[in-house]
């Protein structure tokens, strides 16, 4: 698991107590980078090490078939980091290679199951490149794969990507709201606040439109930046970053007590559109769901 902070990248991992006892102490790792800010707070059994610095807004992450870490740097492009494991929690980046130079990329990144196609997103589109993991190379300038109509620019420019394993040649794309309170999301034809899946066969070169094509998996999701697939069932989970400036009974809701005061919102598929259960609290922006990030699940 990786954590990002500003221009820094942390690597987090868990290991058994017996392994921890025999592993080299982090203090013996001469090449270990030292953060100049407090390290992330982790659950028991986990450790974190800073592995890379001087990155420009690192956002999306994925690992290719050759074990290299691919990082989207917002406003720069995609960079490959080859990480050397020296044992225990001692890791270092051996070399860094620019794979894609594209200042429009914002967040999303994914690889096909065979690591031969690389996907990344800007606010207006999803692109694809033929990718060679052995050479850390993406060929060409990128093919337009999915167009995202974004007339006003919008508050949320991230388009999270996930290439699923249970469905052949299927790419999931998320799109958030155009503003803090986006009432246009009530109209499904706008494409606002939605998660969709798209067929992305290699021989299909036509550009798909996010608003009018694809399979609708979830809607009413203000900013679904985290998406994952259950490794056994293939169910799709997403964490939605809810609205800012939430109020309860006319009073600002304290951000520090979300976990104790909110009930997560459950969603179910019927059969391709999500239906959302009610929450225990009434919010000022009902089309957008809860302020608290919540979990959704889809079954193919």
Image (cartoon, grey):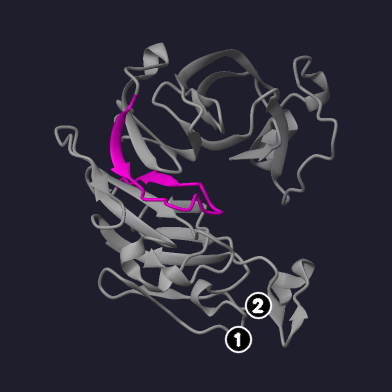
In depth, the one of 185 and 73 nearer the eye is 185
Q: Is residue 26 above or below residue 93?
A: below
Residue at position x 37%, y 74% in the image: 268
Query: Helix, strand, or loop for circle 1?
Result: loop
Name the image quarter holding the C terminus.
bottom left
Label 1 sits on residue: 280
Query: Helix, strand, or loop for circle 2?
Result: loop
Percent from the top left, x then y, of residue 99?
45, 19
In depth, the one of 189 and 114 nearer the eye is 189
Is disc 1 in contact with disc 2, using a CB cutoff of under 8 Å? yes
Percent from the top left, x then y, of residue 143?
29, 29
In depth, the one of 149 and 56 nearer the eye is 149
Q: How many marks are shown on the rendered structure?
A: 2
Q: Earlier in the sequence, mark 1 or mark 2?
A: 2
Q: Is residue 160 magenta?
A: yes
Q: Main secondary structure of the magenta part?
A: loop
Percent from the top left, x then y, of residue 171?
31, 46
> What residue range appears in magenta?
142-165
Residue at position x 84%, y 40% in the image: 38
């Amino acid at each position: 698991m990786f954590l990002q902070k500003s221009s820094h990248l942390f690597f987090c991992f868990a290991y058994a107590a017996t392994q921890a006892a025999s592993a080299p102490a982090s203090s013996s790792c001469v090449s270990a980078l030292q953060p100049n800010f407090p390290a992330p707070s982790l659950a028991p059994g986990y450790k974190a090490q800073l592995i890379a610095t001087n990155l420009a807004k690192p956002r999306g992450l994925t690992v290719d078939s050759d074990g290299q870490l691919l990082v989207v740097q917002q406003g720069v492009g995609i960079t490959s980091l080859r990480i050397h494991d020296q044992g225990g929690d001692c890791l270092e980046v051996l070399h860094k290679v620019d794979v894609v130079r594209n200042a429009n990329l914002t967040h999303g990144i994914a690889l096909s199951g065979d690591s031969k196609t690389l996907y990344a997103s800007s606010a207006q589109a999803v692109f694809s490149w033929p990718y060679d993991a052995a050479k850390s190379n993406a060929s060409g300038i990128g093919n337009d794969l999915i167009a995202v109509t974004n007339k006003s620019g919008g508050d949320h420019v991230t388009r999270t990507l996930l290439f699923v394993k249970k469905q052949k040649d299927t790419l999931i794309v998320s799109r958030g709201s155009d503003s803090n309170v986006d009432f246009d999301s009530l109209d499904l034809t706008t494409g606002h606040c939605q998660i969709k899946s798209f067929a992305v066969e290699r021989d299909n070169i036509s550009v798909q439109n996010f608003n009018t094509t694809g399979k609708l998996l979830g809607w009413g999701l203000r900013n679904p930046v985290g998406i994952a697939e259950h490794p056994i069932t293939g169910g799709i989970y997403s964490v939605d970053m809810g609205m800012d400036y939430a109020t309860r009974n006319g009073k600002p809701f304290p951000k520090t007590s979300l976990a104790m005061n909110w009930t997560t919102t459950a969603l179910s598929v019927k059969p391709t559109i999500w239906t959302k259960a009610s929450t225990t609290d009434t919010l000022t922006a009902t089309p957008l769901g809860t302020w608290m990030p919540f979990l959704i699940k889809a079954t193919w």
